[in-house]
Image (cartoon, coloured by chain):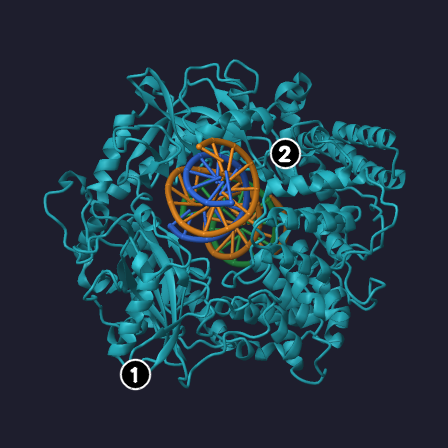
Chain colours: A cyan, B blue, C green, D orange
Amino acid sequence: MLPRAARIQRSGARYTRILAMSKRPLAISTASSPAKKKAKKDGAGQQSISAFFASPKAAKVGATTSTFSEIKGTGGSRQDPVEVLDEDEELARKLAAEEGMDLDAIRAEEARWRSANAAVAHAKEVVKDEDRSIPSLREESASPSKTAPKQHINLAMPKSKPTIMTFPDLLMDPLLTTPEACQWPSARVPFSFLSHALESLSCTRSRILILNILTNTLRYIIAHDPTSLTAAVYLLSNSLGPTYQPNTELNIGGSVLSKALLPTTSLTAAKLRQLYQKHGDPGDVAFYAKASVRTLIPPSPLTVEGMYNKLLDIAGAKGQGVVKRKEEIIRGLLVQAQGEEVRWVYRILSMNLRVGAVRNTLLQAIARAFALSPSPNLSQKEGKEEYVTEELRSQVTAPPEGKKKPPPDAARVKATDILLKAEGTVKRTYAQHPNYGHIINGLLNGRLGELPDRVPLSVGVPLLPTLGSPMRSLEEIYDRLSGLPFSAEMKYDGQRAQVHVCVLGSTHTHANGSASPIKGKEGSANQFVVDVGDGRKASVKVFSRHLEDMTDKYPDILAMLASILARDPSLESFILDAEVVALDPTTGALKTFQELSNRARKDVKLEDVKVSVGLFAFDLLYLNGQPLLSETFRQRRATLRQHFPPYTPQDVRLSARLEWVENVDSEDGEEVVLEFWERAVAGKYEGLMIKILDSGEVVDDELGPKAAEEAASPKKRGKNKAGAEEEETKEREKKNGSRRKPLPATYEPDKRTMAWLKLKKDYVLTTGDSLDLIPIGAWHGNGRKASWWSPILLGVWDENEGRPVALCKCMSGFTDLFYKCLNERYREGSDTCSGTPLWDVETGGYSPTVYFKPHEVWEVRGADITVSPTSVTAKGLIDPERGLSLRFPRFMKLRDDKRIEHASTPEDIARMYRKQDGRVGGAGGKVAPGMDDGELVDVELESEAAEEIESEREEDKVQASA
DNA sequence: GTAAATATCCCCC
DNA sequence: TTCTGACAGATTCGG
DNA sequence: CCGAATCTGTCAGAAGGGGGATATTTAC
């Protein structure tokens, strides 16, 4: 029996899916195309008119519809949902009649939709009756501070009938169920089981239910086909393997996919496009297209492992004719897939499941699944306290159906505690060794508690980086850290690099991870071994921020590392965290990110290096066999500086530099920090990184920093620091009347803590400039933004030509409400929005789906001005061939006080470019005097002004809708 | 049959 | 990289 | 004291500009 809450969720969600149907053009590819392909694209791909914007009937229900989407807004709908159903039915019949085909499949589908139909109808009633307080769009904008109240739709939903096999409900509380009976007839998990799980996932947005579904799914697989587990997890993770391994990329996009789909459907390209228009989601299109096909001989059922292996085949394919070969594999998969499976095969192929579960949730589910259903390979005796045993589980009771939630029973409390512990171990392990395959092997072959030892931090396997939280002013930083000593480091505009070095034959050599999930193909292709010169050799790897192996790209860094090893024979293995920055080879002055990205990436030879770089080290995570993660930043930094003094090569052509990042500490005084920040603003830096030096506690209340410092003490990392210690803290807090949060200065992979704060100059409202731009065109959004305009093309005002010129696209900074209002202000086909360029604008290399009548001005921010191959703004002012564009554009507010003639001009942009280009800085940290002397703003004024601007902005954003 | 242009995909920020 | 929004848990507020 | 309202942290998923790598198409 399904818990009531689950039933409600499920039906509500099913209903969401229908709402989520939307129109979208066939061309899914991005539209950042050079001007030349404009004509072709506009002709073939982009079907721009959508029913919602065109039909008056839809306009009539518009308000109601968006009200619906509020409930579980997976994108809203451009059509009355009920009608979608009718049309689908009709279409199905038509297809069946035309092609003379598989009525059974269509019937089953009909049944499914009909039950959903009932749900929608009911839901509609409920909403109408229950809630008159959901305002229409206009009312909403009148009282913007109130967000629409949450809806609870209480209705019973007839269960849809799976076409092929009957699978259990997966939403139930895993503590109340057990995966006893095998759910499939074969030895291996069929793909249909996974498909069922995905289907269930897509029906809800509740984190709790998503976790339940995933956990239950994995439990069944652990219990009945553990060898398929790794494959299943990768299929669920939108990836084929750890990013640091080669050949985990499919290298296929929308174009290959639709090309492959076409022949499996016996539909014409035009019909397929029609389906795209109808449904929006490519996976749904595949599903409907396939629903019209009859196969004479039913293919053998697709298995999870079979699917995964086929994907590996695709990823491994190389050379001439790959597209054809990949197409064939895909076609094979689509033929094999039945019913619902088609949708998920297709979404997996596009590596975008969109079911609300990615890395963290998946790891949680893995942990819980193993804690509840231990690997069949293990004897039941060991480590009982790490698992939720059958006895314990059977004592857990279901909460009663009433609305009152009584306190959970003791067994549940205990079980939940065990689950949380398991999550902690698995997440921590993954953060230090992000490889699902290794973790699953570890869990299948060892106890939960042994996992960290079985899958340890290893040289050669990148660990996830610590993340910094964005801050908007220096003041906010002092506020957050309430007196804890910190270091302020320059944030360079380059590329993150995690450098792994291990001298071969040293005592601390770590295996580079066994049991790779990537089978066959050239698994461990790139082993980079550098010759130190004194007879030693070392293996070296350089990883990017997203843990991609980019050792290829930096032969000069490898050379530098060889020199470092040569000058210090005691170095055996280490992991450095650093930033690679482009440098002027002679002066050592910093260069821009854009220049760094001009470097070649593959098979780079030392001689071919055109852009010199420096490696600016800021952390040391491992040294000579010893992980340093649990040491404080102060300690790690000291060790780093002790063992890795800066290095300047004799010949800049043959080796990169090694530098320490420039920094000051809070102990140097506030003025010093302020000056440092001003230098960051004036120079070619992104801003500052602020890092806690010692572990401590942050005090939220008035109790002041003293208590915090008192409590500050280096913390030993350990699994069970909980228990008594925590209670003690809580009690102390109660007495003091202050809340404290522990703030560790240890290296916390994958955590976005307050221990690392980033202050970028473009976050700070009074620094960096903002632009006033004119919206001149747009595209249809995807997924969540399917019923809105997104992105939007923005232009500057060119006085000479007397018309707007496109500068950049923009999609960030808009609220949902703003999008809705935009739909009204620029309704397709109205006098403000047209599929053809009715107004005199220069769009350069952009070809938007629709053009807007240029009559508004928006305030927009960005980090930098870039030289652009697409934009034509200010062409000739900086570069004869290329225009200028904006890095990280984001919408701030509507400027209804400005006319388009008052928008920014190409000259403005060019001036900003010159200003940032002339910025001073340099590796030595010297600031050339006399530059930009007017830019320095008193910090106090700054933050006050910022606050004002901030609140103003909020208001404006809302007002924009009125 | 080879070289240049174009299209896609992916990855950096 | 940027951003917003949804959930869920924790805290505060009002009767 | 309890339930509602509000705050906070975490997670997911939209998508920006630029540029290299590679396969495919076109031009000579």
Horizontally, residue A117 falls left or right of residue A53, namely: right
Marked residue nearer the N-terminal end (2 or 1):
2
In the rendered image, which residue does mark 2 sit on? Answer: A76
Horizontally, residue A102 falls left or right of residue A39, namely: right
Tell me the number on the disc at residue A570.
Answer: 1
Residue at image coords 60%, 27%: A44
**Gap in angstroms between the C-alphas marked 2 and 1:** 62 Å
Residue A929: image location, x then y, percent? 10, 47
**Circle 2: residue type:** Gly
**Circle 1: residue type:** Ser
Horizontally, residue A515 falls left or right of residue A581, namely: right
Q: Chain of mark 1?
A: A
Can residue A482 be spotted in the picture? no
Residue at image coords 29%, 45%: A761
The answer to whether A276 is drawn above or below residue A138 in the figure is: below
Residue A428: image location, x then y, percent? 51, 69
- Camera-near label (2 vs 1) is 1
Tell me the number on the disc at residue A200.
Answer: none
Residue A201: image location, x then y, percent? 69, 51
Quarter location, residue A174: bottom right
Can residue A438 be spotted in the picture? yes
Quarter location, residue A178: bottom right
Residues A442 and A595: in front is A595
The answer to whether A209 is drawn above or below residue A877 in the figure is: below
Q: Residues within 10 Å of mark 1 (few under 14, many from 20)?
A: few
Residue A237: image location, x then y, percent? 61, 57
The answer to whether D12 is drawn above or below residue A485 in the figure is: above
Residues A503 and A576: in front is A503
